[in-house]
Amino acid sequence: MVYKLHKSLYDLKQSGRQWFTKLTQYLTSLGYIQSHHDHSLFTKKQGSHFTALLIYVYDLVLAGNDNIEIQHVKHTLDQQFKIKDFGFLASKPAPTPIVKTTKLHNDDNLPYDNPASYRRLVGGLLYLTNTRPDISFAIQQLSQFMAQPTVVHFRALTRILRYVKANPEQGMLYPNSSSLQLKAFSDSDWASCMDSMKSISGCCVFLEDSLVSWKSKK
């Protein structure tokens, strides 16, 4: 006997696809255009106003220069799907994504009471590293504790949000005139991981003055 579901349920294999299909249809009805290069990216342009919405599983990253449109789409999405806003707009900005002396590791601190939200937030910030290499190292550190994050790990995660709030203008700049000189830099802090005693390496590649590739890896 075969059963047909009239409503998609969490944790089923088809639930993610059904959610994405339904959300795509709704965003399209609001005037958003789906990118052909990244199907999880939706954009809307009205004159000089631009809004971008990125889907990461069940989370959405919303950005742009039209605050009215951002508030509108959040309101309509909440009416349609009942969303939750992380609420860090009023938080105190941070000057750096991570404290220099911080050594994150698997410790016996109090476990964070909502590990699922920790995983979703790290996953969302991973998208941001595509244009923000300045947070790559901090995200690499925090992504190691997806299984059992602690309150200390979550506090370090929220600092990245406060840093992004303080530095929204940071990003990639590619000049329209440049030579084809290729430059690469790398470094490593030998055996710095307190849990495994492994090294953490970093590298970046420039085409003249344009950063074209970067990585932070244990």
Image: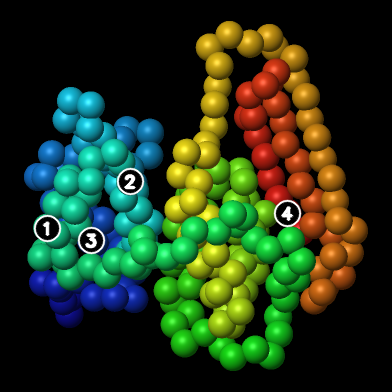
Q: Badge 3 local density, few (<14 within 10 Å), some, or many (20+)? A: some
Looking at the picture, how far across and down is residue 85, in whole percent? 29, 66
The numbered mark at residue 63 is 2
Whichever of callouts 3 and 4 sits on the residue coming sooner in the sequence is: 3
Amino acid type, residue under disc 1 in the picture? Thr
**Residue for badge 3:** 18
The quarter in which the N terminus is drawn is bottom left
Q: What residue is rendered at 32% in x and 57% in y?
A: 60
Determine the CA span between mark 4 and mark 1: 40 Å
Determine the CA span between mark 3 and mark 1: 19 Å
Q: Nearer the viewer, residue 35 or 206?
A: 206
Whichever of callouts 4 and 1 sits on the residue coming sooner in the sequence is: 1
Amino acid type, residue under disc 3 in the picture? Gln
Relative horizontal placement of residue 69, taking residue 89 as reference (left or right) = left
The quarter in which the C terminus is drawn is bottom right
Looking at the picture, how far across and down is residue 145, in whole percent? 62, 74
Residue 20 visible from this viewpoint: yes
Whichever of callouts 3 and 1 sits on the residue coming sooner in the sequence is: 3
Q: What residue is rendered at 23% in x and 68% in y?
A: 83
Of badges 3 and 2, the one in the foreground is: 2
Amino acid type, residue under disc 2 in the picture? Ala
Q: Badge 4 local density, few (<14 within 10 Å), some, or many (20+)? A: few
Determine the CA span between mark 3 and mark 2: 24 Å
The numbered mark at residue 217 is 4
Determine the CA span between mark 2 and mark 4: 28 Å
Q: Nearer the viewer, residue 92 or 40?
A: 92
The numbered mark at residue 76 is 1
